Image (cartoon, grey):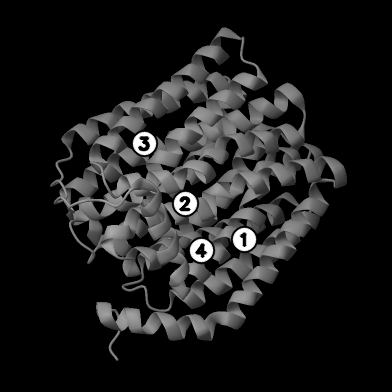
Amino acid sequence: MITLRALRHRNFSLFVGGQVCALIGYWLQHVAVSWLAYRLTGSATLLGVLGFAGSLPVLLLAPLAGLWSDRVNLHRIMFATQIFEMLQAFALAALAFAGVIEPWHIIALSVFLGVCVAIELPVRHAYLLELVGGKEDLPNAVAVTSLVANGGRLIGPVLAGVMIGWMSEAACFLVNGLTYVVVIVTFVLIRVAPRPPRGTHPPFVRGLKEGFAYAWGSLPIRLLLMLLALVGLLAAPYMTLMPVLVKEVFRGGADQLGLFVGAAGLGALAGTLYLATRATVRGLVRVIAFASLAAGLALTALAWSRLPWLSAALLVAIGFGILVTSVSTNMILQTIVDDDKRGRVMSLYTMSFLGVVPVGSLFAGVLADAIGVSFTLFLQGTCCAAAAVHLIRKRAVLREHIRPIYARLGVIRE
């Protein structure tokens, strides 16, 4: 049974209400930007560069943002990032409506958005604890926010395909900017209790080292982040190649691109619904192992599929596997991490997934121009499946180390 118990908290309900609009707008813009870049240049490499430029700030800045989030007012930082993201969307819309937009504009504004996201994501993970007031409903809050994100991922791309066909990419950018008006209103209404001061903080560099040492010294955190990094590097960049797959393999247009991206979103939404039915994080290690394996195998099959309905079904499986892997890892980490290091560990989570995607995107785009999109997808899927098999072999060791932590927290009874 699906449980949304985290929504009983007023602040969290307001936050989710704003994110419903923002995440539909985000995916609307994401598809429109990719389509516009490919329409202007016809280059898969440029799509890789675009993905690299937009996500590179996450790789570089997430650890700093994580340390920062352990020290500052999270509500104010979240509010500020939403305003800057709104301005980025309006800038894209203005350039597109004026008919002067160039590839370098798209890349530069993607980098700007990437900086905002690099700051926002680690802060968001730590901010959830303030919104629900304690750890009891925190795993469910993670699942609910993922449900909202993937609802947007399901609706936004389909809407983008329709809007691009009927109007233009500029209309998508404008709608995305307008969704942030709702987000800003919800942040004005949220009232969170400020965190009590934690005394003196270590110097900046030492604080970073402490976060890295804490994560590396915990075998569960280390192994989970390593698998997540491999999934982010090998599997998640498939989305960068969707415009190429649609145009070169299926000879389709923006509407088919929206449907394919929406199919992946449907799978991710199904994965979120599955996780929302779970009352505990117990057993999620096994789920992560087999979800990442399913994503890798489906990606290898997608490489050779020439039937649109089969490709859409495979994209559902890929979206499900990647989502379940990333969100289950998030749920486990949020449960076992010490509160005073939450921001730093969650920044490593962000860096391990979203941070490595730009490297994978750049590599996938260059490789697709060199050997073709099908061979590229096949290599990505095969490597992802191999990484999942390695985790399955290590599952017993991981379980042995994580059980005492669960027992101490009351997740299981020894």
Closer to the observer: label 3 or label 2?
A: 2
Residue 104 in percent (x, y) is at: 64, 21
How much space separates mark 3 and mark 1, taking CA atoms? 31 Å
Closer to the observer: label 3 or label 1?
A: 1
Q: Residue at x 42, y 79 (%)?
A: 283
Amino acid found under the numbered disc labelled 1? Leu
Q: Residue at x 65, y 76 (%)?
A: 389
Q: Are marks 4 and 2 in contact (CB under 8 Å)?
A: no
* Residue highlighted by disc 2: 350
Residue 208 in percent (x, y) is at: 41, 52
Residue 24 in percent (x, y) is at: 44, 37
* Residue highlighted by disc 1: 230
How much space separates mark 2 and mark 1, taking CA atoms? 13 Å
* Residue highlighted by disc 4: 225
Residue at the far bottom in the pictured view: 414
Q: Residue at x 46, y 24 (%)?
A: 89
Foreground residue, 94 or 61?
61
